[in-house]
Amino acid sequence: MLPEFLKGVFGLYARVSTRDQLDGMSIEAQLNALREWALAHGYPMREFIDAGKSAWTEDLRKRPAFKEMMDAARAGEIAGIVVTHLDRFSRKVLVTLSALGELGKLGVGFVSLENSSFDFSRPADRLMLTVLGAFAEYYSAELSRKIRRGLETRASKGLKVGLLPFGFVKDDNGNVVLDAHDAPGVVRAFEAYRATGVSFNAVADVLNADGFRSRASSGARVLFNKHSVDEMLCNPMYAGVVSFKGREIPGTFPAIISRELFDEVQTIRQSRRKQRYTAYKRHAVYLLNGIVTCSGCGRVMRAQSRTERGVTLLYYHCTTNELKGACTHKSAWINERELVPQIESIIGQFRLPENWLEVLNEMIAANGKPKSNGDDRAKIKRKLVRIADLYELGDMQRAEYIVKRDELKRQLASTRQPEVETIIKAEDVLRSMSDAWGVATQTERREMLRAIVDGVVCDPTARRIVALKPKPSFRLLFRQMRGLQERGEMFEIVL
């Protein structure tokens, strides 16, 4: 006999945990059983399916149908949830108890076909749910341990662990053998890296130019990139060994390269990793990184360094065309050294006339905007507090209070923040900036620039800065400068 609270639309929840099960009947078998149950009891149905999703995770972003079902329960759209077995709902006891506890508070029923139905008001049913949830968690953990033991057993026998890497295939008997077409590509990659110590991107270019293609997890052939090359160059399977938990076991498959070549490449990789870290710590301070955008598409330009003849140079370039987007510039690169003089020429203009404050006030008055008055705003705020106190004490009627309150709020909204004081502070920064710039470090210059602007627009083809986006506090000051024309939030540089 079902409890009385099981009424209305029922959510049918089905789940499989691995992609391998998607080709079988697991989902369909669950749904058939759930549909039969709902039809037998006369319940309308709504199906929620998580295909290939693990019930072990507590992150509901990885189980979108589960989250959708719980949201439907909270919204009162379903009266109950039914699953074929409790472990379809969750194998994590914390998730199970938390979700079922919430369903109980919402008055939403829960039925597990193999575990009967539960009434959350009965202590015995809550105890049973705890036991079943703990058992489901234990089963999942035990399954994980079995998988780990299986992997360890395979590794101890010299069999491959994990996906088959580029350069290997299986023969008709299931044995791992060399791929006649791909194996030479592995040799090419290792020898190219050992000979020149070039970047992973350069090795990828060599492989792609020679006609080799990496294998995606789907089996499709794709171009090599720095990540696929990096993964290849550190895989000891190419040297004929299986690596598992820090141990190396001779493999039952043939080696593609010698152990000496593999070890030499690892030494070079380790050396280059230390060099890159040192170079980053010493040189990678970009003046415009994160704030410079391309004038052709508005995309933030990528900051990247290049070492030429032992000197590290900093560049910016637009990647929109590389990402198959639309941009009028063809991924042009521009050296930061070309932009620095332009920034300095702009900073050199941060000399305002002596009567700048009078000019500023005239501009505010001409625009019909009242000057800021911090005292007026403080008075209005005090009045708001005072009438609120009178209303609470009963010395002012509600209708009168609302009229006065709304009028004071309108007055407060019409007054400006103490903008003149803010601009005076901004002017102090600008007045000393051109003097400080000449003696500042690269890091200090970057911080100084970010103190006054939110964005710098660059035309990488024309190799120049075309516009600036100042911070709000500096907008009125920028209007006083020569060579800048205001357009919306930007100030274009007029040549």
Image: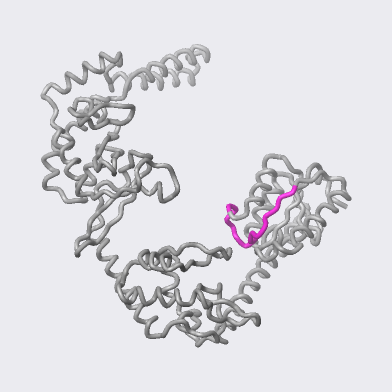
Q: Position of residue 20 (x, y in %)?
A: 67, 66
User: Does residue 17 belong to the magenta stretch?
Assistant: no
Q: Position of residue 18 (x, y in %)?
A: 65, 64
Q: Is residue 10 above or below residue 57?
A: above
User: Does residue 51 belong to the magenta stretch?
Assistant: yes
Instruction: Determine the image quadrant of residue 381.
Output: top left
- Residue at x-position 71% and y-position 63%: 23
Residue found farthest to the front: 210
For the rendered model, the colour scheme is: one colour
- Residue at x-position 62% and y-position 75%: 147
Q: Nearer the viewer, residue 322 or 285?
A: 322
Instruction: Determine the image quadrant of residue 469.
Output: top left
Which image quarter holds the C terminus? top left
Q: Position of residue 66 (x, y in %)?
A: 66, 52
- Residue at x-position 10% and y-position 24%: 354
Q: Position of residue 184 (x, y in %)?
A: 45, 77
Magenta range is 47-61
Q: From the viewer's perspective, is 491 left or right of 326?
A: left
Q: Nearer the viewer, residue 72 or 353?
A: 353
Q: From the viewer's perspective, is 217 left or right of 344?
A: right
Instruction: Determine the image quadrant of residue 32.
Output: bottom right
Q: Is residue 241 above or below residue 113?
A: below
The dominant secondary structure in magenta is loop
Q: Is residue 101 above or below residue 357?
A: below
Q: From the viewer's perspective, is 7 left or right of 135?
A: right
The mark total stands at: 0
Q: Nearer the viewer, residue 187 or 40?
A: 187
Q: Nearer the viewer, residue 47 or 57?
A: 47
